């Protein structure tokens, strides 16, 4: 799979899911660098160059943000709301990747402007296939929105 050098921002607090996502991306030959934010506040800090990410070039936005919903500090839906409310990040490609099966979470995600909502399969083979398809679509086939 051919991808560019832009970053994938994975917002996930579960170390097992971080490892599974990394392995699945490697298995599907997605070569984008991945940054992991362990909570919602860290993700926002990364995007806006604050906290531990102070001084980061904030014009270098991730190619894709994979967002869990159940996060410490700032919940996933609030992270999404803040991303969409800011002119610098409102066009950022955001995919919710979560175990939540709550219909209200799906509806809220789309109401807040998520690009896609994917439930994490429990089985690693299915999860790896899901991540491979996700990478192929969002990083290779999809035409990203122009930067503002």
Image: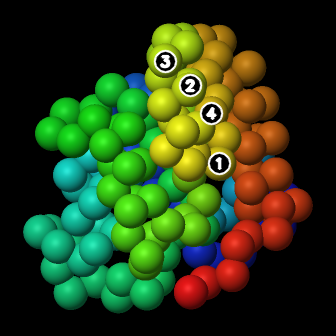
Label placed on residue 115? 1
- Residue visible at 31% across and 43% down? 78
Q: In the image shown, does 41 or 124 lie closer to the viewer?
A: 41
Q: Which dot, 2 or 4, sits closer to the camera?
A: 2
Per the image, the residue denoted by label 2 is 106
- Residue visible at 19% across and 34% down? 72
Callout 1 crowding tier (Cα within 10 Å): few <14, some 14–19, many ≥20: some
Q: Is residue 105 left or right of residue 123?
A: left
**Residue 29 seen:** no
Label placed on residue 87? none
Q: Tell me, yes or no, whether the two marked residues, 2 and 4, touch with CB atoms within 8 Å.
A: yes
Q: Position of residue 148 (x, y in %)?
A: 56, 86
Q: CA distance from mark 4 to mark 3?
A: 12 Å
Q: Position of residue 133 (x, y in %)?
A: 80, 41
Label 2: state its secondary structure. Answer: helix
Mark earlier in primary sequence (1, 2)? 2
Label placed on residue 104? 3
Mark earlier in primary sequence (2, 4)? 2
Q: Tell me, yes or no, whether the two marked residues, 2 and 3, touch with CB atoms within 8 Å.
A: yes
Q: Which dot, 4 or 3, sits closer to the camera?
A: 3
Q: Tell me, yes or no, whether the two marked residues, 1 and 2, touch with CB atoms within 8 Å.
A: no
């Amino acid at each position: 799979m051919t991808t560019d050098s832009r970053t994938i921002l994975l917002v996930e607090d579960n170390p097992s899911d971080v490892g599974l996502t990394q392995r699945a991306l490697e298995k599907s030959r997605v070569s984008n660098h991945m940054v992991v934010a362990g909570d919602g506040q860290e993700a926002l800090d990364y995007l806006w160059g604050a906290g531990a990410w102070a001084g980061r070039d904030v014009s270098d936005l991730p190619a894709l943000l994979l967002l869990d919903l159940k996060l410490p500090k700032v919940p996933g839906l609030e992270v999404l709301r803040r991303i969409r409310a800011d002119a610098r990040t409102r066009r950022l490609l955001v995919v919710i990747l979560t175990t939540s099966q709550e219909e209200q979470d799906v509806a809220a995600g789309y109401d807040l402007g998520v690009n896609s909502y994917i439930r994490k399969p429990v089985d690693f083979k299915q999860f790896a296939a899901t991540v491979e398809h996700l990478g192929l679509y969002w990083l290779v086939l999809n035409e990203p929105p122009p930067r503002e």
